[in-house]
Image (spheres, rainbow, N blue to C red):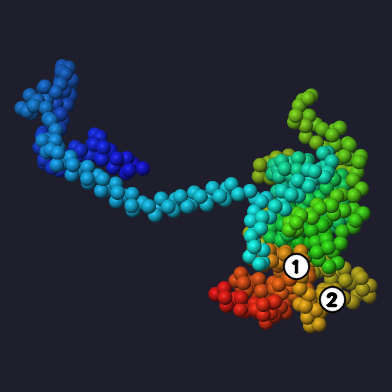
């Protein structure tokens, strides 16, 4: 910007200090140098006069007398038309040169600004995606779900959802949400996490006192199941029986997740054998692309719902600031909590919890070690339970039986491969592979190995999509589950051929 201004001033002929520099170079600067020396000498004389107690004013005439010369004037060459014209052409050439050289940087800056503007203005609940056949679609599941709540639930309905979606539910659905982005109340968020990560019956016992509906983000990627280890960790920071002896819930294994309320609601009807007790939760909405599922909580406690608005703690009569209290029906659960001392010291008066904090940060610094410890502890507990079940002291390898039960025969794999249809499972697998979420896929296949062999309507399946998108790690994972690379889709193309085309 300063360079551009400098050039413009030169082209327009405005006065610049640079002219003095140019004049020195052209004329040798004799007059100017003498004038500068005279000024310095005059200042020295003035200072000497002041020291002697005689104040003397030094003006330009005295400077002339000291130098024996008259005041300086612009050099003659600067007034010549050819000099002025040549100078202006020089400035113009310099300006054009700088403009041309800066074009790549200007275009790069403009492109970056456009990308940032697009990213910052792009709503996270509405986005474009591509189907397997390459068609671009608009995924509007989240907004449609919020509108469904707005149009189909009573105005006093309370929605239970993880805090990430709280503000969206409040603003778009116009309903009360149990938690939102204002997460300073760690104990409250932990209670919500406990309700979602507890077994279905235990979760329902909490939810029926807090809300009327449960909303979940589903559909793979960063959905609520993918977040569930974090939910369990937060819940365990206050309710230590969630992951005993494991502050970061490294032992949050597939077996524990499979029993949680969150998993049951998320995978209800999608994973064989996973069903929700309809006496406790009734599904009332599922979005078009399976991104959102909403359940109505059955047997909601009317006493708790009526108790809460009558027992708000207002800081002054008629004030808008009236924090609520938990109803008596939750007191048994609340007695088990241990206030989490945060860095902000909101609970500074709480009892010392340094041992838990120490273990927490140890597990964070070395998660692999913490995971191994958790697995050992979980295996010992499982062995103890097996001995108790055996009754005679003999250990029964339940894990081996479970693995044998889940393993597939060649005939079963062949039968699955022959069933081509688009389902919510194929859509979920496609989204997981597209996002390269190998952890979610590994967990999914560990629990339901048969889904590795499913095929969509066009005859393609996980192995095809992995090759097509260049997901080498996912290809290796699918191979360990016995998925063939020689299968052919409806056009007779194999996954390997898709990989060659991609390369």
Q: CA distance from mark 1 to mark 2?
A: 26 Å
Q: For the residues carrying marks 1 and 2, which lies nearer the camera in this image?
A: 1
Q: Quadrant of residue 492?
A: bottom right
State the residue in front, 464 or 24. Answer: 464
Q: Quadrant of residue 256?
A: bottom right
The secondary structure type at the circle numbered 2 is helix
Residue indicated by mark 2: 405
Percent position (x, y) of residue 498? 61, 76
Percent position (x, y) of residue 170? 74, 41
In this view of the protein, can residue 280 be seen by the observer? yes
State the residue in front, 244 or 51. Answer: 244
Furthest residue toward top:
54
Q: How many numbered discs?
A: 2
Which quadrant would the N terminus be assigned to in this image? top left
Residue 117 drawn above or below residue 494:
above
What residue lies at 87% left-to-right and 39% top-to-bottom? 305
Residue 449 drawn above or below residue 102:
below
What residue lies at 88% left-to-right and 71% top-to-bottom? 386
Which quadrant would the C terminus be assigned to in this image? bottom right
Residue indicated by mark 1: 422
């Amino acid at each position: 910007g300063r360079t551009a201004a400098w050039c413009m001033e030169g082209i327009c002929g405005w006065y610049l200090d640079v002219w003095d520099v140019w004049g020195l170079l052209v004329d040798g600067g004799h007059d100017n140098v003498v004038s500068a020396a005279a000024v310095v000498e005059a200042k020295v004389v003035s200072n000497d006069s002041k020291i002697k107690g005689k104040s003397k004013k030094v003006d330009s005439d005295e400077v002339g007398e000291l130098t024996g010369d008259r005041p300086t004037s612009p050099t003659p060459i600067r007034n010549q038309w050819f000099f002025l014209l040549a100078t202006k052409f020089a400035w113009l050439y310099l300006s054009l040169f700088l403009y041309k050289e800066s074009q790549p940087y200007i275009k790069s800056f403009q492109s970056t600004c456009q990308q940032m503007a697009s990213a910052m203005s792009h709503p996270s609940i509405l986005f474009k995606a591509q189907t397997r056949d390459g068609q671009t679609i608009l995924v509007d599941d989240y907004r449609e779900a919020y509108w469904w709540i707005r149009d189909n639930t009573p105005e006093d309905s309370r929605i239970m959802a993880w805090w990430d979606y709280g503000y969206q539910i409040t603003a778009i659905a116009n309903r009360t949400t149990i938690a939102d982005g204002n997460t300073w109340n760690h104990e409250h968020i932990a209670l919500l996490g406990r309700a979602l990560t507890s077994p279905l019956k235990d979760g329902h016992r909490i939810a029926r006192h807090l809300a009327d509906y449960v909303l979940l983000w589903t559909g793979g990627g960063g959905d609520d199941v993918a977040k569930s280890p974090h939910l369990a960790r937060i819940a365990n920071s206050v309710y230590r029986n969630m992951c005993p002896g494991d502050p970061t819930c490294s032992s949050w294994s597939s077996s524990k997740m499979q029993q949680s309320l969150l998993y049951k609601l998320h995978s209800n009807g999608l994973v064989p054998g996973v069903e929700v007790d309809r006496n406790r939760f009734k599904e009332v909405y599922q979005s078009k692309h399976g991104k959102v599922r909403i359940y109505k909580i059955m047997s909601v406690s009317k006493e708790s719902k009526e108790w809460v608005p009558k027992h708000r703690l207002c800081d002054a009569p008629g004030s808008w600031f009236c924090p609520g209290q938990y109803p008596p029906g939750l007191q048994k659960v609340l007695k088990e909590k241990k206030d989490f001392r945060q860095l902000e010291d909101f609970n500074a008066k709480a009892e010392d919890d340094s041992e838990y904090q120490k273990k927490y940060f140890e597990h964070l610094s070395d998660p692999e070690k913490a995971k191994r410890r958790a697995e050992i502890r979980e295996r010992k507990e499982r062995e103890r339970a097996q001995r108790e079940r055996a009754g005679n002291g003999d250990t029964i390898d339940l894990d081996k039986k479970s693995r044998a039960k889940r393993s597939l025969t060649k005939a079963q794999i062949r039968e699955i491969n022959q069933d081509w249809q688009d389902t919510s499972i194929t859509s979920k697998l496609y989204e997981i592979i597209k996002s390269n979420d190998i952890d979610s896929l590994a967990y999914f296949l560990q629990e339901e190995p048969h889904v590795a062999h499913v095929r969509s309507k066009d005859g393609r399946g996980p192995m095809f999509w992995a090759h097509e998108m260049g997901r080498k790690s996912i290809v290796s994972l699918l191979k360990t589950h016995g998925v063939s690379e020689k299968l052919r889709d409806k056009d007779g193309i194999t996954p390997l051929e898709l990989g060659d085309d991609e390369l």
